[in-house]
Amino acid sequence: MNPIGTVETQFLDLPGPVRLDSNRELGPIRIAFETYGTLAPSRDNVILVCHALSGDAHAAGVSPSPSADSTRDGFAAEDRDGTAGRGLGWWDGMIGPGKAFDTDRYFVVSTNLLGGCKGTTGPSSTDPATGKPYGSDFPVITVADMVRVQRSFLSALGIARLAAVAGGSLGGMQALEWAVRYPDDVDSIVVIASTHALHPQGLAWNAIAREAIMRDPAWQGGHYYGTGRKPDGGMGVGRMVGHITYLSALALGDKFGRRLQFADDVRYTITEPEFEVESYLRHQADSFVRRFDANTYLYLSRALTYFDLGREHGSLDKALENVRARALLIAFSSDWLYPPVASEEIEAALRKLGKPVEYHLIDAPYGHDCFLLEEARQTPIIRRFLCE
Amino acid sequence: MNPIGTVETQFLDLPGPVRLDSNRELGPIRIAFETYGTLAPSRDNVILVCHALSGDAHAAGVSPSPSADSTRDGFAAEDRDGTAGRGLGWWDGMIGPGKAFDTDRYFVVSTNLLGGCKGTTGPSSTDPATGKPYGSDFPVITVADMVRVQRSFLSALGIARLAAVAGGSLGGMQALEWAVRYPDDVDSIVVIASTHALHPQGLAWNAIAREAIMRDPAWQGGHYYGTGRKPDGGMGVGRMVGHITYLSALALGDKFGRRLQFADDVRYTITEPEFEVESYLRHQADSFVRRFDANTYLYLSRALTYFDLGREHGSLDKALENVRARALLIAFSSDWLYPPVASEEIEAALRKLGKPVEYHLIDAPYGHDCFLLEEARQTPIIRRFLCE
């Protein structure tokens, strides 16, 4: 029995359009969201959790229709094994009574990001100008745009102030952006396996995944909705690239080694998987294309490559100089996509500015995926930080 | 003036078919090859150099028609910057008078591998059974098959014995296979940035590149020759993946950082490159698809993932127990595709068996590409080894 129980995703339409970094105005905007726990009468116990590239609003509890909902076959952010079909939220291990984000105390809010494909307005939504899905006419968005929209959404709920903003990977970028953009509205941020600016190899992996989608003829310049074709082939390849970057070489070795599909010998085939890891990659690709929209992948990937607090503000120090939120930073030793050095740079900059910051490097072998897997070791760190 | 001067690729047809590991018989087989230096009357000064995944027979000297030959725009094995249009061989820095493989002393032979697309019989060659290109009817080949064919080719040239077999990456696998398969015919092997069995993450990167090709509808099940379409989109993505795995994250950072194409600001585009590294990847993909055949990529990638001396012989020790060649192993500290640990395992196994082996770990930042770039530091090691 899940302590949070069944949670239905809700929807809210923002009262007006939002002006984006690109200077385009976007509206109407619908937000898909879930909440866990109880809002205090003083409205001062709100934690916003922000998902990563492939996530959705369903962060905790059980989805009412897991078997019917193919979005639950793999998990938000990065897929977790063993949860398929149970409909658990992507951070269920972290959100609930007595957990890291304790619903006995906090009112936890999770939204599907702007640009998403799980209920929040994104490229697959209807463009009011044409009556058809936006496709690649959807405006290019940034992490700041995602945060603007979250701010507008929370205002509509009557929430003016956050006890914390928390997230891993792209979710951590949003937490940082909250602290920089709305310094008076955020008490604390929890930034996990994230960065102030993705390193060049990370830019490259993201570019390759986007190329794989856009080079698939079924992408059709981004206008594939309603054509009966979609770029599953290309997005599958992009997902394979992403998946390997989320895991450490060591973890991949421990999990699969060089084991063959058929133990006796190779079968001399180019087209069929020979090694277990080859079969696993195909499975990951196939399940992902069933639950995720390729254009959303493109837009969110682009947004996370753009994110660069130093470039946007002149320097990282300048970006952080008005921050008032206490900051908790967590990184993982084997994470080579969001390596610990970025968290260390943020820590050093905040310290130099005299801001309250706490940094934990967790020694763990699973790579970037640790932020979803190492719940037991993150929990006491986050609970203690939030209780201060 | 290049010391080797202009070198024309030559061709030789093997006298008979070759029985492959898959038990299929393949013939006729044509070999594209080049030679540098002079064959001694005693025929005991022959060094065979073996190329890597994307190479060809043109290992040294100047191609007679570099501008007309698009194969020279990027370089064999892994592309090198700055040599485009000059038609230099892919290992020109290592082969020549006074160089690592000294043509004043040795007769250096380089062949295009079985399965290649640069003159040696491969998937783009004509299938005598149909009169059309083999395409995916070409038999699946192994590193052992490549070596069998080289052996047959050298016999046809009247060469029974090799002073050395040398190569990097897939080329190093061939050198190892020569020592294991023909212990009485090889005096020494030079195995650079290679392995006795690619690690699981390497299997994954290769699988992803092959998936990118095969998921491109223009691949047409492997029978794209003569259709006016070929899987350039997919092979471009595969090449991008390969290219990033050949470089270290540090080298990529030093080379590109997060520099934008247009220094002032981002342009809010999904489809156009924003970062220099994104533009570079497109350039790499575009130049590669002009010079390389997608089916050859599939077949050679499959062969290098199969290679596993331990699996094929019961254990690495058993594989190496009959080796009589002296072995020189070189690895590079930043090579994460063919990490040093594999060379260390080979060294340990040879030492345990009492075989002569010398291992050098070169501390260098460029990743797997070091085997093509770190010529100055490899040269004295190789010259001293060959002189013993």
Image (cartoon, coloured by chain):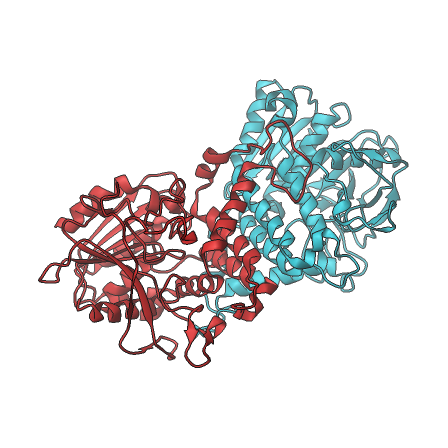
Chain colours: A red, B cyan
Q: Is residue A166 above or below residue A146?
A: above
Q: Is residue B92 visible?
A: no
Question: Residue A371 versus residue B349: which sits nearer the camera?
Answer: A371
Q: Depth check: B307 or B373 in front?
A: B307
Q: Position of residue A45 (x, y in %)?
A: 14, 57
Displayed quadrant of residue B2: bottom right
Q: Is residue B145 left or right of residue A69?
A: right
Q: Is residue B102 above or below residue A211?
A: above
Left or right: A75, with B177 as reference point: left
Outermost residue toward the left? A42
Q: Quadrant of residue B220?
A: bottom right
Can see residue A29?
A: yes
Left or right, A113 with respect to B340, comes to left
Name the residue located 74 percent from the left edge and 61 percent from the top edge: B70
Q: Where residue B331 sits: x, y (%)?
A: 56, 38
The quarter of the image holding the N terminus of chain B is bottom right
In the picture, the quarter occupied by the C terminus of chain B is top right
Q: Is residue A128 above or below residue A203?
A: below
Image quarter of residue A169:
bottom left
**Residue furthest to the bottom:** A129
Which of the two residues, A353 or B215, is positioned nearer the viewer here?
Answer: B215
Q: Nearer the viewer, residue B199 or B231?
A: B231
Q: How many marks?
A: 0
Residue reaching furthest to the right: B15
